[in-house]
Image (cartoon, rainbow, N blue to C red):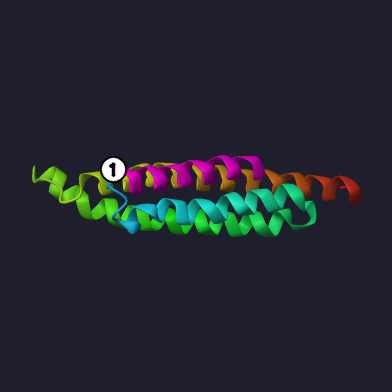
Amino acid sequence: MAKISLVFGTLLILLGIYGFVSTGSMHKTALIPAWFGAPIALCGFVALAKPALRMHVMHAAVTIGLLGFIGSVVMVGKAVPKLIGGQPLERPVATGMQAIMLVLTGIYVALCVRSFITARRARRAEAEAGAGV
């Protein structure tokens, strides 16, 4: 999961930079995906560099990803009624970026949860095998 964190963190950072540049570098809120991506990538880096901390930093990373996902759901959710009603969006670039962030963080959180479940099952199976059960 550490390498996946680096990939998703980097994608979020690039999304934030793209949004900032595409809005004329005037809207600092366009960097929000980067503000989530940087700590996720940092957690991935720490997990690779310090295996003893892997479990803790990966839980921190998925928590950051989950917060980003929830925030994206809220923001995209506000735009959906306008889209359904055929009304123009006030900030179409921002809405598009929020939708991309929603997808990226959603996939990231799902991959993390799947990895945590797999790791827990492996630890349980190892413990049962060691106990002779």
Residue highlighted by disc 1? 96
The image shows residue 111, relative to residue 74, as above or below, that is: above
Q: Please tell me which residue is depicted at 60% across the width and 40% down the height of the picture.
A: 4
| Residue 2 belongs to the span the image colors magenta | yes
For label 1, the crowd category at 10 Å Cα-Cα, with few meaning under 14, some 14 to 19 and many 20 or more, is few
Residue 27 position, x and y percent, is 29, 56
- Residue 93, located in which quarter of the rendered image? top left
Residue 73 position, x and y percent, is 34, 53
Magenta segment's dominant SS is helix
Number of numbered discs: 1
Q: Please tell me which residue is depicted at 46% across the width and 56% down the height of the picture.
A: 35
Query: Which quarter of the rendering shows the N terminus?
Result: top right
Q: Could you tell me if residue 132 is visible in this image?
A: no
| Residue 100 belongs to the span the image colors magenta | no
Q: Amino acid at mark 1?
A: Gly
Q: Please tell me which residue is depicted at 31% across the width and 57% down the height of the picture.
A: 74
> Which segment is the magenta one?
1-21
Residue 107 position, x and y percent, is 48, 41
| 15 left or right, relative to 25 | right
| 90 left or right, relative to 34 | left
Looking at the image, which is closer to me, 107 or 29?
Answer: 29
Looking at the rendered structure, the secondary structure element under dot 1 is helix
Q: Could you tell me if residue 12 is visible in this image?
A: yes
Q: Please tell me which residue is depicted at 56% across the width and 56% down the height of the picture.
A: 39
Residue 77 position, x and y percent, is 26, 53
